[in-house]
Image (cartoon, helix red, strand yellow):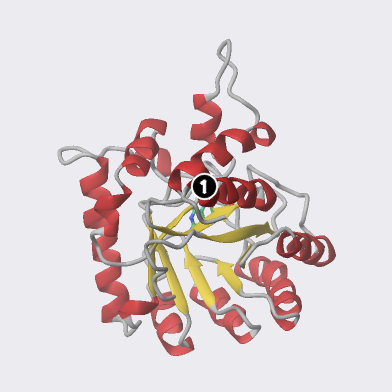
Amino acid sequence: MTATAAARLPRVMGIVNVTPDSFSDGGRFDTTETAVAHGRELLAEGADILDIGGESTRPGATRPLVAEELDRVVPVIRELAGEGAVVSVDTMRAEVAEAAVAAGATIVNDVSGGLADPRILEVVAAGDVDYVAMHWRAHADRMRDFTDYSPDGVVETVRRELGERLDAAVAAGIPVERVVLDPGLGFAKEPRHNWELLARLDVLAGLGRPLLVGASRKSFLGTLLRRDGETRPVGEREHAHAALVALLADRGVDVLRVHDVRATRDALAVAAAMKGDP
Ligand code: PMM
């Protein structure tokens, strides 16, 4: 993925979770037909990229079998890539990445940054595709135990740990210009960690690679909007997310990974107009 010029708006990556158990849209698009239809809808709303995933990474989730994950994502990727969409596969598994690339995916989005299955780095290198390396510390069933960022604090620690993943990717043969980095909002992060990272994306940009940010519908937004001790439900966080998108528009983010493509596009249009670039 080539870096977007600083003045350009972020690109929009629409999420297609082909899972029965995602926290944000679990079960709504868990057949090939519903997932493909959802992908087409997101493209019509202005998505630049579709991110297709078959494993829920919500806190506490258990992992699907490899065969299940393959069955979920490969037919959807084949169909949407065949229609000309730019497709990313959201997987931590080398085997799934390999099949996804063969089916037409041109981006491998690995939330583990190569830690869960290091062979994925070789698959990406051999496949000559882009690689999103997210900051990650443990699988979803254990990540709540890994939120200690002392002594250096979350921003510096994530910068260092992401830098190590970038080095590992390059050492495995992935050209550096193919790598995009992601702070991994919500993954082994308390709400305050997510806000600190969002406020200091410039530090992560110092690693010299484009950034992808995924905040859409995440629980730190629900916590922010809490009233009377009740966290705001997952389907009622899109206005806060749109406000965040507008604020991120000129922070050098290259890709926004979102559920609500239309609201994201609207927020980016407002940000562009405010910069005199409607
Ligand atoms: N978040 C989720 C899944 N995949 N990939 C990247 N690169 N960054 C993220 O922040 C990210 C991801 C979990 O959220 P979802 O259940 O809404 O897809």
Can you give x and y, in whole percent of width and height, for residue 104 in the image? 63, 83
Q: Residue furthest top?
A: 228
Q: Residue furthest right?
A: 33
Above or below, 21 relative to 87: above
Element on which disc 1 rests: helix
Q: Is residue 20 visible?
A: yes
Above or below, 193 relative to 141: above
Q: Residue at x 31, y 78 (%)?
A: 176
Placement of the C terminus among the 4 image quadrants: bottom right
Can you give x and y, in whole percent of width and height, for residue 228 in the image? 58, 10
Can you give x and y, in whole percent of width and height, for residue 236 in the image? 67, 32
Can you give x and y, in whole percent of width and height, for residue 233 in the image? 65, 29
- What amino acid is at disc 1? Ala
Q: Which quadrant would residue 169 be assigned to in this image? A: bottom left
Mark 1 close to ligand 1, CB under 8 Å? no
Relative placement, left or right, of 167 versus 41 is left
Relative placement, left or right, of 50 versus 155 is right
Placement of the N terminus among the 4 image quadrants: bottom left
81 or 70: nearer the viewer: 81
Residue under label 1: 271
Q: Residue at x 32, y 67 (%)?
A: 209
Q: Residue at x 61, y 67 (%)?
A: 48
Q: Residue at x 45, y 52 (%)?
A: 139
Q: Residue furthest left?
A: 151
Q: Is residue 186 visible?
A: no
Q: How many marks?
A: 1
199 or 184: nearer the viewer: 199
How many residues crowd around disc 1 within 10 Å: few (fewer than 14), some, or many (20 or more)? many
Q: Which quadrant would residue 37 be assigned to in this image? A: bottom right
